[in-house]
Amino acid sequence: MLAGREDGAIVGPSSVIAAVWGRFLPEGGRQLAVATHAGHLALIDEASGRVEFDAVWAGIRDLGATDLDGDGRDELLLAAGRSVTALGAAGR
């Protein structure tokens, strides 16, 4: 299971190693970030199911989400190898 909520659950294949909910985009709403063993990273919109971001990032180990800069949107924290990178959406 990737995520559980009061109205259901999202399940994924065993290749998924990390998943986190957050409010990453300026348009609002929540998104689910998912990482796989093969280094695939996807950001999926909760309401529409649309893939908003899709990339390959070698060595992903874990994901996190928090608002680091106080702008009301979460930054996606990505642990890969021995480093952590914070990804944020550009404002509109």
Image (cartoon, rainbow, N blue to C red):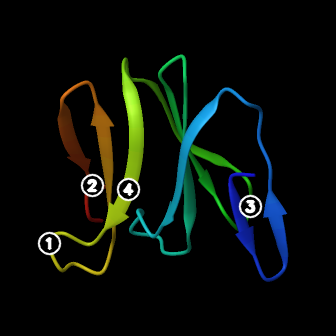
Query: Residue at label 2?
Result: 88
Q: Earlier in the sequence, mark 4 or mark 1?
A: 4
Q: Which residue sits at x=20%, y=41%?
A: 84
The spot of residue 91 in percent (x, y) is: 26, 64
The spot of residue 61 in percent (x, y) is: 40, 33
Q: Which residue sits at x=55%, y=22%?
A: 37
Q: Earlier in the sequence, mark 1 or mark 2?
A: 1
Query: Residue at label 4?
Result: 64
Task: Look at label 1 and name its amino acid.
Answer: Asp
Q: Which residue sits at x=42%, y=63%?
A: 25
Query: Residue at label 3?
Result: 48
Task: Please give left or right for residue 26 compared with residue 2 in the image.
Answer: left
Binning the other alpha carbons within 10 Å of mark 4 as few (below 14), some (14 to 19) or many (20 upward) gives some
Q: Quadrant of residue 92?
A: bottom left
Query: Residue at label 1?
Result: 69
Task: Look at label 2 and name its amino acid.
Answer: Gly
Asked which secondary structure carries label 1, the reply is loop
Q: Which residue sits at x=67%, y=64%?
A: 46
Asked which secondary structure carries label 4, the reply is strand
Q: CA distance from mark 1 to mark 2?
A: 10 Å
* Depth check, front residue: 81 or 47: 81
Q: Earlier in the sequence, mark 3 or mark 4?
A: 3
Q: CA distance from mark 3 to mark 4?
A: 22 Å
